Amino acid sequence: MAKMLMDRRGFFASALASGAMAGAMAQTDDSRIFVAPHEGELHRRTWMCWPSTHAIYESSLAYFEDVQETLGRLASAIAAFEPVSMLADKSHHARARRLCGPDVELVDIATDDMWSRDSGPVFVRNGQGEKAVVDFNFNGWGGKQTHDQDHAVAKAVADRLGLTVFNSGLVGEGGGIEYDGDGTLILTESCWVNDNRNPGLTRDEIERDLKELLGVQTVIWLPGVRDRDITDGHIDGSLRVVRPGLLMMARNPGDTSSVWAQARAEAKAILNATRDAHGRTFDIVEIDSATKPRSDDPELFTSYANYYVGNGAVFTPEFGDDTADRKAFEALGQLYPDRQVISLNVDRIYETGGGIHCVTQQEPV
């Protein structure tokens, strides 16, 4: 595997030396360059992971089973629009089949928890239609959670599909990156320039590797928030790339003084002063988070930013806050006019600090 990455880096170095990569990578005629396609492109399938370790949740068995039921309903909803493959050790298949329904494929790959966006593969594709997998060496968000099985998920999926694995040695998560498929990557320093994941590496070193792994030319760093949630401020909880040049940003009504509000204000200022890989300025559409949800769980994550773009549909939470739910539904319908907006009660997932995007990972065609 080290040779695979060395060959890849050797190609980049050669292309740079020859001037083939001057300007936007999209302008080169070399079809070997691997790029992470935007989430809105057509999917071959969605990959998900079964929550199989009750001890992680520090909750009653009944609550844990509710989490499984919620994930099963979500998988079934997505499977109405595109194939879904659920990773689970075969010992969990009987229950997973009952809760996911007949349309979800069960794959015998062991998992600890359900966060496939973070533990799963990030797919890249070149101009010849070849796919590969980027493995970001999931370590439980800096050692905060059990990850013995989840650490191996990305490579296991790649092996099943017969795909090459690109691995630079970076540690990170798919939820920590937002990319437009057109040369631009947005992420937070709090996740990546962090000794709990990449000790001793500078921002420039991390950026260099990410450019090579994901096929981007412009990397936009936002501050993020450290040590306040398990992810250290994943980008997909607050900001999403709708399409090149258009962003959706979460806003917490009335919050102007928290560390989250301060990080958001700084992020918006950076984005307003920045251009993407092709010189475009950003249009930013803001959607207010829910403030009157039905759940009284203090850990409930109420941002609508953590939606998932599937084939023909956008999957978003509804929190029981009628006004906020309706406004988010309408806003997403305007942002994605070619897709049906599907609102789901997935409170049990959002009570654990993640969301719909966190438990899904797209594989492009």
Image: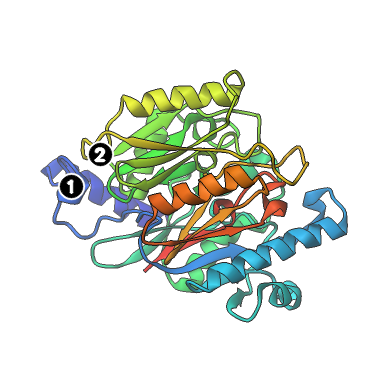
* Badge nearest the viewer, 2 or 1: 2
Query: Mark 1 sits on what residue?
Result: 15
- Indicate the position of residue 3 as horizontal and vertical percent values: 37, 56
Residue drawn at the location 63% of the way across and 47% of the way down:
322
Q: Quadrant of the N terminus?
A: bottom left
The residue sitting at 75% across, 78% down in the picture is 94
Image coords of residue 300 (percent x, y): 70, 42
Question: On screen, 24 above or below 275?
Answer: below
Closer to us: 320 or 216: 320
**Outermost residue, bottom direction?**
102
Q: Which residue is mark 2?
A: 277
In whole angstroms, how far apart are the C-alphas of marks 2 and 1? Answer: 18 Å
Left or right of 300 in this view: 188: left
- The mark that comes first in sequence, 2 or 1, is 1
Residue 110 visible, this orientation: no
Disc 2 vs disc 1: Cβ atoms closer than 8 Å? no
Number of numbered callouts drawn: 2
Three-letter code for the amino acid on which mark 2 is drawn:
Ala
Q: Dot 2 lies on which element? A: loop
Q: Amino acid at mark 1?
A: Ala
Label 1: how many Cα within 10 Å (few below 14, some 14–19, many 20+): some
Q: Which of the two residues, 198 or 236, is positioned nearer the viewer here?
A: 236
